[in-house]
Amino acid sequence: MEESTAASPDWSKLPSDVLTTVLGELEFPDLFRAADVCTSWRATARTLRRLGIYCRPQTPCLLYTTAAAGPRAAELFSLADKKVYRARLPDPPIGERNIVGSSHGWLVTADARSELHLLNPATGEQVALPSVATIEKVSPVFDSAGNLERYDLSLYGEEPQPYAVDELRGVLYLKVVLSCDPSLGDCTVVVIHNPSRDLSFARIGDEKWHWISSPPREPPRYSDCTFGDDGALYAMNLLGGIHRYAIEGSRTTRNMIFKDTSPFIAHNVYIAKTSYGDVLQIWRIKDSTSGEQGEIHTARVDIFKADFDSQKIVPVRTLGDDALFIGHNCTYCLSTKDYPRLLPNHVYFTDDDEYWLMDGHEICRDVGIINLEDQSANDVVSPQPWLNWPTPVWIVSSFNKIHK
């Protein structure tokens, strides 16, 4: 007598609503693989992305350009599965832009005319931001035929300095952060920019940048900023002081919530909030090598908790289960309980040094991972596949769409 065998389940026959729910819970590497299972799974995966309703939080990727991909594509090294994915991007070519920010799945880039754009590598959507000519202290200069010839950047108390149209971006923009995913609406964009590490902001759709002025004879000198859960902007200066800005319309109200704590100016300092609610000051210490092929390397990362009651900083020995990301991206901590492929108590960093980035595009980039337990550093991937320009940046992919 033959033994009966149960028929294998036909997973292609799953109800569409169940399949949509299941695939919607996968990170994008798994979603892409699931799309290869059968025709119905592929169709559901495509529908999720096409409709812009695939919104599962993603493990960060390292975005960069390579010679093999060409100037119109970027590659993303996923920390979730340690594999590389390629994204074709709209013009102007990503290889000809400066990357000056990464927030909520969107890059902020400056093109050859020093104009800023938001760009989502996952969806290919792109949004132009207000003209650079509307930023305080920037003046466009035209020739006799009415063509843009250059920009003048006014320095405090000094004569304006002239910059070529494509040169200004490397001097002006230091970092750009977003208040939220632009696809959710009411997104505010904040730029930290020269001549004195000022702040300017605009909402998507605005025609101009709004400058946040500082008290007389008190240059702002901001190093990093982030949006809080209350919707306010929190900006930290080079001395560790933290200012809270409430933004209403084109106006802001400033409150100093944490006094300056550093006895000296530190150019590579960041502000972030842990997954358990502490506000951190992150100090990045670098070493440099001399010679024609001089390089800069992150030697250590020191972390302090901002104690708002005592108005002092307290050394933090460990991030516990958190992983920290610093660079041109919006600075953030992620819990490895939620993102198990990340390394706890590690700092993932990319190059954002203002002066080294001004010096040229051929300098080897400072990218890696630091273990805070012993300050040892390791490569993200070896050998490093990226071009030195534009600089690699961390990004948390978002498949949400503005135009659904």
Image (cartoon, rainbow, N blue to C red):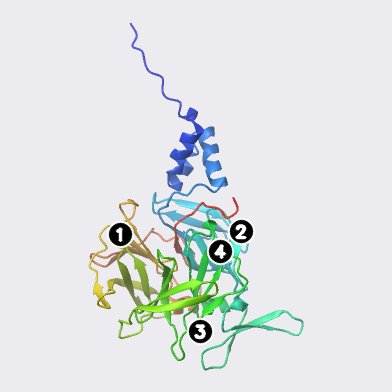
Separation (CA) of disc 2 from disc 4: 11 Å
Which tag is nearer the camera, tag 2 or tag 3? 3
* Residue wearing tag 3: 195
State the CA–CA distance, disc 1 to disc 4: 28 Å
Disc 4 marks which residue?
Answer: 118
Label count reads 4
The answer to whether the residues at label 3 and label 1 have Cβ atoms under 8 Å apart is no
Residue beneath label 2, please? 90
CA separation, marks 4 and 3? 23 Å
Q: Which mark is residue 368?
A: none
Q: Is residue 78 above or below residue 287?
A: above
Tell which tag, 2 or 4, sits nearer the viewer: 4
* Amino acid type shown at disc 3: Pro
Sequence order check: which comes first, mark 4 or mark 3? 4
x%, y% of residue 314?
A: 24, 74
Which residue does the numbered mark 1 point to in the structure image? Answer: 322
Q: Quadrant of residue 163?
A: bottom right
Q: Is 161 located above or below residue 211 in the figure?
A: below
Residue type of the residue flagged with mark 4: Leu
